[in-house]
Image (tube, rainbow, N blue to C red):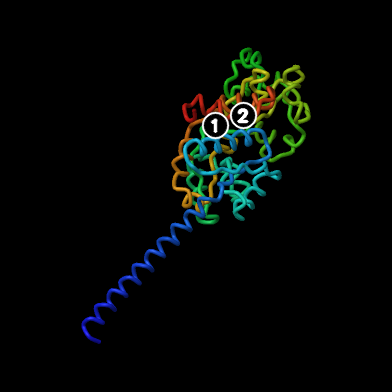
Amino acid sequence: MNHTCKKIFSILLLCTVALLAFSGCGAKQAQQTEANSEPLRVGCKSMPEQMILQEILSQLIEAKTDITVERIDPIAGGSSNLQVAMESGELDLYPEYTGTGWLTVLKLEETDNADYMFTELNKRYNEQYDMSWVSLYGFENTYTLAVRAETAQQYHLEKISDLAAVSDQLVFGANFDYFEREDGYDKVCATYNLHFKDTAEVDMGLKYQTLNEKKCDVINAYTTDSQIAEYGLVTLADDKKLFTDYRCSTVVRNDALQNYPQLQEVLELMDGLISNEEMIQMNYDLNTNHRLESDIAREFLQAKGLVD
């Protein structure tokens, strides 16, 4: 091969390599664009609190990024069905509670170390499901005991252990299964040395009304129930850490974090954003004032200075 031919061959070879490299970059860019053109699917459980959180997450992502968000209809059946939807890719993220992930999804033994739980949840979800837990919202929807404000004032009740000295003067009301559960009435009484004057089986939907009507004095509750605000009740602190930690966070597929580079930073804005009192009020606005979750979420984010 003469010198001229060699030169032409070298030029052609360089052009071919450059073309292949450009094609590779173009394919990668097209792949990335195609991934980002898909809407980000945000899910939630079929319960009012979760529907509010779905809106908060969706509106925050829309306000801070150019990501198209698709709100998936609330999924009935709880965390088991949501986990299946996450694993199949039908969902990209949803709000979840640490205790639920720990006990229901991972099926681990209870632990009273909340920080260890969150760290271990993140580790195991990454290893087993290629998912992450991002940011603790700040509120906790866990079990508690609630009393009327006048009862709390009369007996100086702030924490559950305060009940020990006066429980024999009070009636405990709860839904039927709470008296049967291993982590229910008997365990609470044994842990806190409580001996109530009497007990009353109350329909789950009527617990708060029954307490307000003074047909009982203490009930089991969830810390963010809207009826706590509606009836002006006092929740008692679990000072012996009996109840499993149910702090709220975002579970997100790792491929969604990779496909949408802005997503991680936005989800981190949820860290410490919502207090128990704020979540109770938002639940109250939805359940009692019958406001739209989209309006509740927008006003909350506006008050936090996160959306216009």
Image location of residue 186, percent across then percent down? 69, 35
Quadrant of residue 110 within the rendered picture: top right
Quadrant in the picture for residue 222: top right
Q: Position of residue 266 (x, y in %)?
A: 47, 39
Q: Provide the residue designation for mark 1.
A: 139
Closer to the camera in the image, 142 or 73? 73
User: Is residue 124 in view from this perspective?
Assistant: no
Which amino acid lies under the numbered mark 1 shown in the image of this protein?
Phe
Question: Which of the marked residues, 1 or 2, is nearer the chain's N terminus?
Answer: 1
Determine the secondary structure under disc 2.
loop
Three-letter code for the amino acid on which mark 2 is drawn: Thr
Query: Callout 1 environment at 10 Å: few (<14), some (14 to 19), or many (20+)?
Result: many
Residue 13 located left or right of residue 152: left
Local crowd size for mark 2, using a 10 Å CA cut-off: few (<14), some (14–19), many (≥20): many
Q: Which residue is mark 2?
A: 224
- x 38%, y 64%: residue: 22
User: Residue drawn at (57%, 21%), measured in percent from left and top?
Assistant: 158
Which residue in the rendered view is the most extreme toward the front?
4
Where does the N terminus fall, quadrant-wise? bottom left
Q: Is residue 263 above or below residue 140?
A: below
Q: Is residue 306 above or below residue 65?
A: above
In the image shown, does 241 or 117 lie closer to the viewer?
117
Q: Residue at point 68% right, 44% down?
A: 75
Judged from the image, the secondary structure of the residue bearing numbered disc 1 is strand
Q: Is residue 183 visible?
A: yes
